Image (cartoon, rainbow, N blue to C red):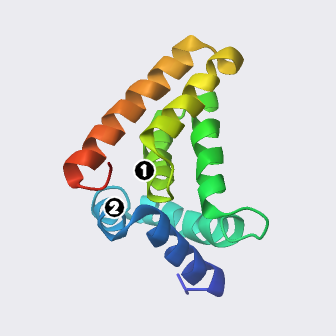
Amino acid sequence: MTESDMYRKGSEIRRQLMGDSQVQKMAASVYDDPMMKKFGDYAREAVFGMLWSRPGLDLKTRALICVISDAATRAWPELAIHLRMARRQGWTEEELGEGLLHLAGYIGLPSVREAMLTAKEVFAEMRKEGEGA
């Protein structure tokens, strides 16, 4: 793929949101085959390059929107990714936990329970990696 300006911008935003080690880990485990590489290239350009770089919301707010959206749609693998991004953008474990708990009245306890179990795992991993407090 020829790297467009949006692709390069998306690569930088993605690296800022995920950190070098997570980007490298995903490159080696998720985007290591041709089909998934195409998906990753598209996401980098269209989602990170075009959506995440739009004016009007900061990266911290956009990360929280993704966390809430993932919990509401029961997208657990994506929730794990977006929780990491949200932590890297300054949301605390307590704030994210409270945001997820707030959803109980709107999306139901089973979804919130699963979201909180995902958050528990992600936060423990991040603390072990030295990325979370």
Q: Residue at position x 59%, y 80% from top?
A: 9
Task: Confirm or deny contact between disc 2 and disc 1 (CB under 8 A).
Answer: yes
Badge 2: residue crowd in 10 Å (few <14, some 14–19, many ≥20):
some
Q: Where residue 8 sits in the image (x, y, percent)?
A: 55, 83
Q: Which residue lies furthest to the left in this view?
A: 128
Residue type for callout 1:
Arg
Counting residues from the start of the chain, the first of labels 2 and 1 encountered is 2
Q: Distance between the residues labelled 2 and 1?
A: 9 Å
Q: Above or below — where is 85 with respect to 104?
A: below
37 with respect to 22 (left or right): right
Label 1 element class: helix
Q: Where residue 78 sits in the image (x, y, percent)?
A: 49, 43
Q: Residue at position x 49%, y 40% from top?
A: 79
Of the residues tagged 2 and 1, which is closer to the observer? 1
Quadrant assignment, res 28: bottom left
Label 2 element class: helix
Q: Above or below — where is 125 with respect to 121?
A: below
Q: Residue at position x 59%, y 33% from top?
A: 99
Question: Closer to the camera, 1 or 133?
Answer: 133
Count the marks: 2
Name the residue that disc number 2 marks.
Answer: 22
Q: Above or below — where is 99 with respect to 129?
A: above
Residue type for callout 2:
Gln
Q: Which residue lies furthest to the top in this view?
A: 109
Name the residue that disc number 1 marks.
Answer: 84
